[in-house]
Amino acid sequence: MKNIVLIYILTIIVCLSSCGGEEKAKENTSKTPDFLELSESQLATLNIKFGKPEKKQIVQNVYLNGKVKSLPNLSATVSSNIEGKVDRIFVVEGSIVKKGAPLMTLTSMPLIELQNEYLSAKSESDFATIELDRQKELVRNNVGALVDLQTAEAKYKATLSRVKSLGAKLELLGINANNLQDPKTAKVSNAVTITSPIDGYVIKLPVSVGVLASEQTVLAELVNVNELHAEIYVYDKEIDLVKDGQSVQIDFVNHSFKSVVGRVQSISRSIDPETKAIEVHVTFNPPDNALVLPGMSVRAIVLNKDEDVTAHAVPLAAVLQEEDNYYVFGTDSEIGSGKLRIKKYKVNLGDKDESFTEIVFPNEVPTNLSIAQNNVAALEMQRKQLIGGL
């Protein structure tokens, strides 16, 4: 009987002790602070500094590679509109030429035949004009047949159309058809002059004297380097950072030319199946006294900058990352008061550059909040020690 009473008393004591321990644990948990209190000397030992979030622009640059290309209207492939043999060449590769300047001449048998056709067509047209006038006069005098007038009018229109067509062909070849109007004074040309269609440099001259050139033969290639464009390659993860009209800094990686700033002219609406890149076309003017040519490699820095937008930003070292969450440590205590109350705040990150990141607080925070600028891992360790020690 005594043993049973003793066991009963011990059971009551254990239960009371357990309940008291749970209440004490609950009391300790409820008193766990959500802030640290550290003296400024402790912070100095940890090499931690506080500062206000800066209101500044966040420039998130995009670094890309590409090549120089010529603009479609400022490059030219020259060929002849008629078959001929290269007779004389007036330029060499590297020559600077103006629009309309002669590049070479071609002697051409088809050109002689074309002028002969024009003269024959002009003669037929003149005769058709006379015959049409004669038939009109006969019809007015009631001695001509209407059908003859209609036939004369049809022949007149056909011959006139042929004269205009052949004249247009001669004009393309640089021959003035008016100079062939009078057969007695007409001088039939046996050569056609090939002229430059643009201002620029001759970059290729793949023919020599004596070569027989057809309409498909490339006689010369020219490019105007006063205005060029760069074709840069952007991958889909960065395409949202590139916009039409955006400023782009162009660096010439294999040359000592100065950097220049261009603008995004257009963005391709397709992805290259091989490179998985999107082509972005940037127009720019080359540096002064620098010969920038198509095919040169460039490094492009897309300047992702909005001059009208600023944000609260802190150094990258001020942000603590835990899995997919981001935190900063802040205090609303006056710096220099001796002891600071430091709290851990969850934040969202915005744009960032090489040194700073934009931070956004989900909830309202004190306006006089100062943020730990560095060594936030040490503050997190102090916070965990404080929680663990209670």
Image (tube, rainbow, N blue to C red):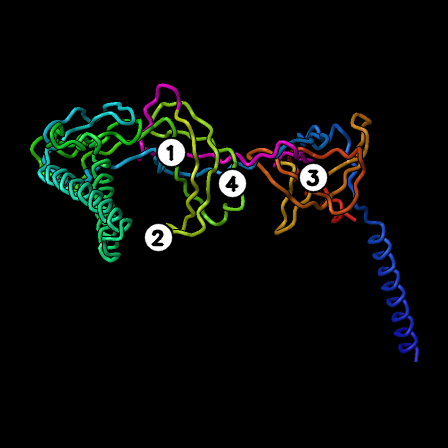
Gap in angstroms between the C-alphas marked 3 and 4: 44 Å
Point out the tag, 3 or 4, that comes first from the N-terminus. Answer: 4
Classify residue 356 by image quadrant.
top right
Point out the tag, 1 or 3, that comes first from the N-terminus. Answer: 1
Point out the tag, 2 or 4, that comes first from the N-terminus. Answer: 4
Question: Residue at image x 22%, y 46%?
Answer: 134
* Residue type marked 1: Val
Classify residue 289 by image quadrant.
top left
Residue 133 visible in the shown view: yes
> Which element type, helix, strand or loop, lies under badge 3?
helix
Residue 284: where, in percent of width, then height?
A: 43, 30
Q: Is residue 249 left or right of residue 158?
A: right
Gap in angstroms between the C-alphas marked 3 and 2: 49 Å
Residue 333: where, in percent of width, then height?
A: 81, 32
Number of marks in the image?
4
Q: Which residues fall within the magenta stretch?
A: 287-316
Question: Residue at image x 62%, y 51%?
Answer: 324
Point out the tag, 3 or 2, that comes first from the N-terminus. Answer: 2
Q: Which residue is mark 2?
A: 274
Residue farthest to the left, as pictured: 210
Residue 377 marker: none
Above or below 128: residue 191: above
Q: Which residue is mark 4?
A: 244
Residue 379 marker: 3
